[in-house]
Amino acid sequence: MNQQSNTMNPMKRGNAVTKETGNRKQSFDKSWQAERIINSMNNGVCTFQFKKKDGTIRSAKGTLKDVNIEVKGTGRPTPDANVLFFDVEAQGLRSFKVSNLI
């Protein structure tokens, strides 16, 4: 799995989220929260919540450990303000916007 966006510096991710939200402090708080989630997913399964595009709250169990799935798609890189993960319940790749973390 290409984890390019997941290995990003939290400061760079915070700047990307700030462009999206306009709130620098909240953006950097969410960026560091995402960093902790990514570190947990690199070591095993992590449970976290985020707000979906339709406004509903989603509780996810995700991992990045030992994920060997070829990502198919447009070939465009994942936006800096997003995090890719493998959803262990749905058995598929998912992503969330860092600004939508709860």
Image (cartoon, rainbow, N blue to C red):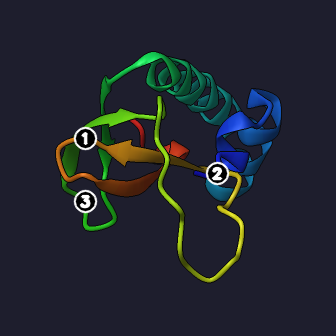
Q: Earlier in the sequence, mark 2 or mark 1?
A: 2
Q: Is 63 displayed left or right of 35 in the figure?
A: left
Q: CA distance from mark 1 to mark 3?
A: 22 Å
Res. 22 in view: no
Q: Which residue is mark 1?
A: 88
User: Disc 2 on helix, strand or loop?
Assistant: loop
Q: Amino acid at mark 1?
A: Val
Q: CA distance from mark 2 to mark 1?
A: 22 Å
Instruction: Out of 72 and 82, give the one closest to the viewer.
Output: 72
Q: Position of residue 76 (x, y in %)?
A: 70, 75
Res. 38 in view: yes
Q: Quadrant of residue 35?
A: top right
User: Disc 1 on helix, strand or loop?
Assistant: loop
Query: Which residue is found at the position 79% from the left and 42% from the top?
Result: 15
Pick the quarter of the image with the C terminus: top left
In the image, residue 64 sits, relative to residue 89, either above or below, namely above
Q: Amino acid at mark 3?
A: Gly
Instruction: Out of 70 and 50, give the one closest to the viewer.
Output: 70
Q: Which residue is mark 2?
A: 81
Contact check, label 2 and label 1, Cβ < 8 Å: no
Q: Which mark is residue 55?
A: 3
Q: Position of residue 92 (x, y in %)?
A: 31, 56
| Of labels 2 and 3, the one closer to you | 2
